[in-house]
Amino acid sequence: MLLCIDTGNTNTVFSIWDGTRFLAHWRIATDHRRTADEYFVWLSTLIQLQKFELEIGACIISSTAPRVVFNLRVLCNRYFNTRPLVVGKPDCLLPVPPRVDDGTTVGPDRLVNTVAAFDRHGPDLIVVDFGTATTFDVVDIDGAYIGGVISPGVNLSLEALHMGAASLPHVDVTMPAKVIGTNTVACIQSGIFWGYTGLVQGIVQQIRAERDRPMKVIGTGGLAPLFDQGFDVFDAIEDDLTMHGLRLIHDYNKEMGNG
Ligand SMILES: Nc1ncnc2c1ncn2[C@@H]1O[C@H](COP(=O)(O)OP(=O)(O)OP(=O)(O)O)[C@@H](O)[C@H]1O
Ligand SMILES: CC(C)(CO)[C@@H](O)C(=O)NCCC(=O)O
Ligand SMILES: [K+]
């Protein structure tokens, strides 16, 4: 079985692939201080609760937080007796290398999204990921990541508004019926919801114009379904894009006789 670990700046998701399907997805807050032993106690509790018999034979990690990787490596070595593949490191092969400026380190989550979206939807894509940051990853004809856009994530913007303005509360994101809010919460919800809707529509339109070709738009991340209600910009929503990509990259490395 394959253990896939997706560490974002906010949350880390552990998923188990049994060769045919994902058996479980477990989420924990990202914290670089968490030790290998702590991860293992947490994981084995969940494994026991679900009454799984797990034989982890391989691990793959994507981490946007470099400091977390050390303890995740120790977890894989010590408790699963495997050397993990770490996306973005030279010893982890990608089906197609990214085409970006020399010296740029592309976020591994964006590389993984690109691989997964290309596998499912073919060439010429814009992947919009609503995570800690809202990112746009552009996929070329051959599946390469060729750049994109990074903007502040929805929850980060909400938090910044609450932190910076003494009278503004923290609110949840929902789709407001109207643009003109008639109370503080409704005004903030409108700003976030219609603001991000406009941001996504505008950036997608400009990417399409710059590329001058038809492109499909794939939405992913926890908030993608919410933003799908407001407007018709996504050709598809994928809730497991990162895990699918991690599995593909693992399989690719295995095929190539790597690791
Ligand atoms: N209506 C909502 N309002 C606010 N947050 C929401 C809502 N629906 C889902 N979420 C959030 O979406 C998140 C799941 O999204 P996802 O896993 O894509 O990103 P993340 O964990 O926040 O970021 P990262 O992957 O960068 O760590 C959860 O943190 C969840 O709280
Ligand atoms: C943009 C984020 C934070 C999105 O998770 C991550 O992909 C990252 O840290 N990227 C590094 C810079 C880049 O992707 O160009
Ligand atoms: K993510």
Image: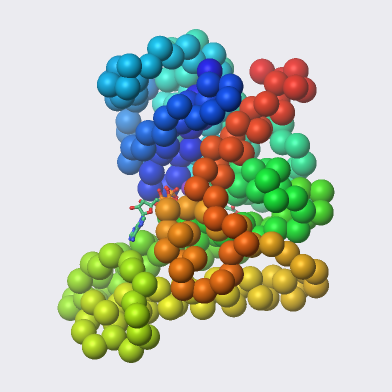
**Location of residue 60 with respect to 199 vertically, above or below:** above
**Quick check: can you spot residue 107?**
no
Residue 162 pos. (x, y %): 25, 70
- In terms of image quadrants, where is residue 179? bottom left
The residue located at (44%, 77%) in the rendering is 195
Relative depth, front residue between 79 and 56: 56
Residue that appears at 38% across and 48% down: 10
Tell me which residue sits at (17%, 78%) in the image.
167
* Foreground residue among 193 and 104: 193
Along the line of sight, the residue nearer the viewer: 145 or 123: 123
Whether 7 is drawn above or below 200: the answer is: above
Q: Is residue 244 above or below residue 85?
A: below
Left or right: residue 38 versus residue 125 is: left
Query: Where 6 falls versus 98 (above or below)?
Result: above
Residue drawn at the location 58% of the way across and 25% of the way down: 20
> In which quadrant is the C terminus drawn?
top right
Residue 131 placement: quadrant: bottom left
Please indicate, yes or no, whether residue 50 appears anywhere in the rendered image.
yes
Instruction: Give how far across and how far down residue 240 sits, in percent.
Output: 52, 43
Image location of residue 242, percent across then percent down: 55, 42
- The image shows residue 150 at horizontal and vertical percentages of 55, 62
